[in-house]
Amino acid sequence: MDTMTGQTRILAALAGEKPDRVPFVPNIWQWFYVNRSRGALPDQLNGFSDPVDVLKFMKVDVFSKFDGEALTETLHGCNRTRKYLGKRSPGQPTWSSFARFEDGNVLEETVDTPHGALRHVWKYEPEAGAPFESERWWKDFDAEYAAVRSWMEDGDWVLDKSALEHGLDKVGNSGIILFQLLPSPLKKFHWLIGQDKATFFLADHACEMRELADIHERKSLELLEQVVDEDDVWVFEVPDNLDSRFYTPGLFREYCLRPLQKMAQVVHRRGKYLFIHACGRLKHLAPLIVEAELDCVEGQAHPPLGDWRLEDARALSDRLIVCGGMTAAEQEWTGPDAADRIDRHVRNLFAAMGDKRRFLFASGCNTSPRTPYENLIAFRDAAWKYGEY
């Protein structure tokens, strides 16, 4: 029988204490919406309209980044417009962590600046449960640099208090939210330009890109000071997609290390935690993750999807919180022995983690839409069995 709430269990794990058991915090946002769109949710979940309701039904711990989306951009001299095209897909959510789809499945955005207009296009793909960019904001360095700089200097990010309160109320004492901050300067460039072209811009126009990075760093720190003292918010996340294939150690040191260190110091002075999201290989970034004073790389994946095992991450630092352990490679197992294979996987993983403190058993980095619901229950039951202290 549980002796703690999801919230107290997670907070105890973050602090390095011993909760009654290891928190099990699957990220099922994409899994839920894709399967709802397909009409493939199991019968017992058909009445639910939100992933958090499913997590509560499963009696697992809630660790919701999507309910930590509570920022709005205020423009002073620029103007942003949105136009929706196409037809909404069945079961399509009105928003994701990247773009809001109040209508249609295509979002065209334009920012008019004193130096010209910038245009961007998203398309929501129901089979993936996510939007994809079909047109980036910044396409030509010389033609659009002044407009990009004008936009970055003009905008301020402010807290949407009602959105934050809604997220906190929804999660309640079943868990906590991960408050989503602005990305690192490097990830900001990836969003504006694309990972490939951003690398060329950084190499060919180092001085100008450094100036933009400094502007973004200042805006990020101003925002953090605005929100860091919010009640009932203990974890702040930098919404990057950390992967050494796009974040080389050199680029990380140049465009991520300093702002992350400054943010960590602000958060740590309040006794709170700074996370960053992972989407791939991390081994070459390991020393920089520790140097950046990050508390956790959230959603990290072990091999074959990632390139380090969770016990290797644990060995980096006694302070580091380890979050991961359930990747698509195991989630999608099928056949009559799937539950037994999941049980063995969890047993071996938990044994390798030692005393299991500062460990969140989580998706790495999400839950595949092809995961059978029975597998989620098998992961939960194994986590309960082997995660007790």
Image: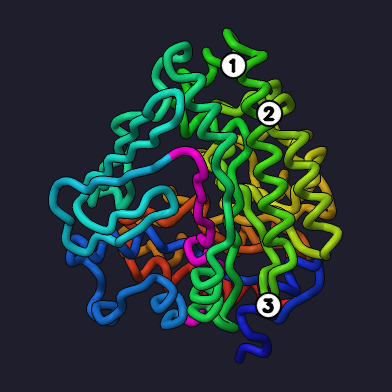
- Mark 2 touching mark 1, by CB under 8 A? yes
Q: Is residue 149 magenta?
A: no
Q: Residue 50: percent from the left, percent from the top?
A: 36, 73
User: Helix, strand or loop at disc 2?
Assistant: helix
Q: How many marks?
A: 3
Residue at image x 39%, y 36%?
111
Residue 157, given in percent of the width and then of the height, sits at 57, 51
Residue 132: image x %, image y %?
Answer: 32, 39
**Residue 203 drawn above or below residue 358:** above
Residue 332 percent across, percent down from the top left:
36, 54
Dot 2: within a 10 Å radius of its alpha carbon, few (fewer than 14), some, or many (20 or more) residues? many
Tell me the amino acid under the disc marked 2.
Answer: Tyr
* Residue 87 drawn above or below residue 374: above
Q: Tag 3: Cα neighbours inside 10 Å, few (<14), some, or many (≥20)?
A: many
Query: What residue range appears in magenta?
Result: 59-78
Q: Which residue is mark 3?
A: 9
Disc 2 to disc 1, how far (Cα)? 10 Å
- Residue at (62%, 33%) from the top-left corner? 185
Closer to viewer: mark 3 or mark 1: 1
Name the side, left or right, on which 259 lies relative to 206: right
Q: Is residue 277 visible?
A: no
Lateral position of residue 241 relative to residue 137, left or right? right
Is residue 107 toward the left or the right of residue 219 in the image? left
> Residue 257 or 324: which is nearer the viewer?
257
Residue 121 lies in quadrant: top left
Q: Which mark is residue 202?
A: 1
Give, as a three-letter code, the residue at label 3.
Arg
Quadrant assignment, res 374: bottom left
| Labels 3 and 1: the sequence-earlier one | 3
Q: What residue did someone put label 2 on?
A: 255
Residue at left 67%, top 90%? 3
Which of the two discs, 2 and 1, labels the residue nearer the N terminus? 1
